[in-house]
Image (cartoon, rainbow, N blue to C red):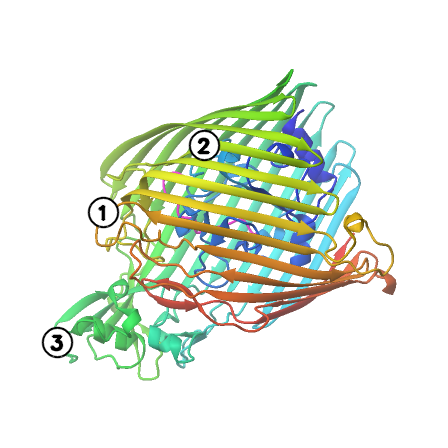
Amino acid sequence: MRKTAILIAFLSSNAFADDLAPLSIFGGQDASEIAGSSAFITDEELKKSGYTDTERIMGRVPGVYSQTEDGLGLRTNIGMRGVNPNRTKKVNITEDGILQGPAVYSNPSMYFYPDAGDAEGIEVLKGAAAIGNGPRTTGGAINYLSRSVPTTGSKGHFNQTFGDEGYLRNHFYYGSQMGPLSYVIETHKTAYDGHKDIDAGSGNDTNSGFRKNSDLFKIRYNMSDSYLELSSQNTSETSHASYIGLTRTDFDTGNEYRRYAASSLDKMDNDYHRYIMTYGLDISPQTNFVGKLYKSKYSRNWKKVGAIYVSDDGTSSGTITKVDLANVDWATNCAADATTELRACNIITNATAMVDNEYVKRSLGHRDYGMYGYDLRLNHVMGNHDIEIGYRKHRDYRDRRDDTLEERFTLGSNETAVIDTANSDYVSESGSSDGGNDDYASAESIFITDRITHGSFVTTLGLRHEDVDYWQYTDGASLDTQNNSQTMLAASTVYSMGNGQSIFGAFSQGYMPTGVSSVEPEESDNFEIGYRSSQPGSYLEVVGFHVDYDTLIETCGIAQGCGDSSQNAKNAGEAHVTGVEVFYKVNNLFAAPQMKGAESAGSAIRYPLTVALTMQEAEHDVTTSSTIVDGARIAYTPETIYYVALGAETNGWSTQLSMKYNDDVYNKGVNTSAKTESATIFDFNGSMNLDGMGMAGSRAFLNIDNLFDKTYIASAHNYGYRPNKPRTVMAGISVDF
C-alpha cells in the first residue's frame, strides 16, 4: 500500500465523505487503523459551511479549541487536549505536509495561518497518530490541504459572498489535465470593515476589519511511474488589529464593541510567499518515494500601541513616566492602579484629556521570517509490515528590525490621533534598522513507523528524533547558542471486533524545544484508549486520554496573559490533563435503524445529526510561584466544550442549526486572575441547488453566525477585555463547473 500515492488519488477523485466522518484514507493511513481520535473536514463541508476562519471550523472537532484574539479568526490560537493555545506553539501546523508558520523552530508564534477558506481539506491527528509530525505535537497536528491538480478532465469553482459590515468574499479556482500536464489556479479575496466601533475623531480611521488576498498556482507533469509538481502561493493581508481591549466597566455597560481612539492607528500588514517542488516515484508496487523542496518568506509590520507617557501630576510641568498598558488593571476600570497607571488608563479611555508633554507610543513591530529545507519520505510494504521512513532538513529565522523604531502621537480634544513626526523615531513603513533579538535555527528530524497487521490486530510502532541548533544575536552583536535534542516513542494497537467496531490504545511522548533560553524543554507522556463504531449511516468514537507533564512550559505573550511580567516563557513544573472526547454522527436521525444510511430519493427529508463533546481536567500539580498554583487550571484550557448540529435536507436543499458551547478559561496559571465567560452560540446555514432553474452546478446559500446575537467576554488579556463576533449575516451563490 503506497500511502502517499493513494492519498493523492483519493483527494483528486473528490471522493469525500460527510463532514468529520471516518475516511478510508486519512493522512496516508487507514482511518480504521488509527489508534486515537482523528478528523477530516472535507472540501464539500468547507464549501457548505462557508466558514473561512479556522476558529469556527475547528469548533466541531472534539478535543480542539481556540482562544479568539480579534473575533475574526486571523490570528487563531489553537489548543488540543489541555495545552495552552497561546499562538499555537504546542500544536504542529502544516500545509500539504510542509511546516507552516513564520519560523517554526526559531520563533514558533503563529502570526500567519493557511487560509481555511480556500483549503481543499483539513486533517486533524492527535496522540500517537501524530508521531510522523513535528515538532510540538503534545496536543496533536493539523494539516491543511491546498487545492490539488486534476488527474483527469477539469474542475472549477466560483463563490461570491456578501454580508454585514461590508463583508465580501470572492473565491475562484480552475484546473485541467492535458495529456501529461495538469495545473490549477486559485484566487481567494476577503474583505470586512469590522464590527468594532472606534471612537471617531475627525481624522481617525474607523475601519476595524481587514483585507486579505491569496493566490495559488500548481503545475504537474505526470510520467508513467513518477510525477513532478511545482507550487507557488502568495498571500497579503492588511488588518486593523490592536492589542487594546476594554476595561471591565466599559464592557459591562453596553460598550462591548467599542474601541478606544488610541487604537485607531493600529494596523498589521502581512506578506507571505511559499514555493514547493515535489517529486513522487513508484519504485515498485511495494515501494513509494516522495521528496519535497520548500521555501517560504513571511513579513509583518504590526504598528500598535504598547505604552503611554504620562505626567505624574497631570500638568505640563510634571515628570513624564512610561506606563506599559499591559500593567494597567483593566478589570477594575483602573481604579486600583497607582497614580500614573490610573492617568494612563483615563487617557486611553478618553476620560481625561492629555496635557502638552504627554504622548502615546506606537511601536513599529516589523519582523521578517523565513524557512527552507527538504522533506523525504519512503514507504515500503513487506509482508504484514507497512514501513514509513521520513527525514527532514530544515532552517528558519526571525529577523527583528524594529527595536529602536517608534512613533509618538497625541490625542486631541476631538479624540483625533495626531502623529508627532518631529519627535518620532520613524523612517518608513517597513522599518529601517536591525535591533532586538534575531533568531536562527537549523533542525534535522527523522522518524520511522512500522504498522504491523496480525489477525484482528493492527499495531503501530513509531520513533521520532529531533535535533535542533539555535543561534540568537542580541542587537546585532552578541551571539548565544543552544542545542535541543530529543527522541520520542509511540506505540499503539487497534483490535477489530468485527461489524465495524474496534477498540484501541496508545502511548506517545511529547516534546517542545525552547530555543536559546534557560527554560528546560517540555516533556510529556501521553496515553489514550478508545472505542470506534462505523455503521451504515452512523459513526461513533469515544476516546479517553491522559497527559503527564514533567516540565510544563507556560507560554507567554503580550496578546495573552502570563504569570511572568517580563512576557517570557517559563517552566511551570508538573501538570496533568485527563479527559474524554466523543464524536457521534448519524445521517438520518428519525429514520428507522435499517434506513439511516440509505440515500432517499426525490424530496424525502433527511435529518443529519452531529455531536462533538470534550470534557477535560488540565491542572498544575505543583506550586512554583504566586502565578502557578497546585490544583489551578492551566491557562486558557476549557473544561467542557460541546457542539451539536441538527439539519434537514433533501437532494435539492439543506438547512442546519448548530450550537456551540464555549467554556470559560483563566488567562494565568492561578485561578484568581481575569477570565473569559462561558457562552452558547447558535449558527444557521441553509442552501438550495439551482439546477432546476437552468443553473447547473449552482447553489444559493445563507449563513447567519451567532444567530441570537449573544455577546460575551471571549478574551481576557493583559490589554483588556474583548468580545466575540456579533450576529453576522452572509449570503451568496457558488458554482461548480
Badge 3: few (under 14), some or many (20 or more) residues near its Cα, within 10 Å? some
**Label 1 sits on residue:** 624
For this view, does 16 lie left or right of residue 460?
A: right
370 or 196: nearer the viewer: 196
Q: Are marks 3 and 2 in contact (CB under 8 Å)?
A: no
The span picked out in magenta is 104-115
Instruction: Write down the residue under mark 3.
Output: 318
Within the image, what quadrant is residue 673 found in? bottom left
Distance between the alpha carbons at the discs numbered 3 and 2: 60 Å
Based on the picture, tell me whether residue 351 belongs to the magenta stretch. Answer: no
The image quadrant of residue 10 is: top right
Q: Name the amino acid, label 3.
A: Gly
Q: Is residue 107 magenta?
A: yes
Q: Position of residue 549 (x, y in %)?
A: 35, 39
Q: Is residue 589 visible?
A: yes
| Quadrant occupied by the N terminus | top right
| Dot placed on the residue nearer the N-terminal end, 3 or 1 | 3
Q: Given contact means CB atoms under 8 Å apart, are the residues at marks 3 and 1 in contact?
A: no
Q: Position of residue 35 (x, y in %)?
A: 56, 34
| Residue that protrudes farthest toward the top in the picture | 383
Label the magenta part by its dominant secondary structure. loop
Residue in the picture at 47% in, 69% down: 208
Instruction: Say what secondary structure mark 3 lies in.
Output: loop
| Left or right placement of residue 55 versus residue 254 in this view | right
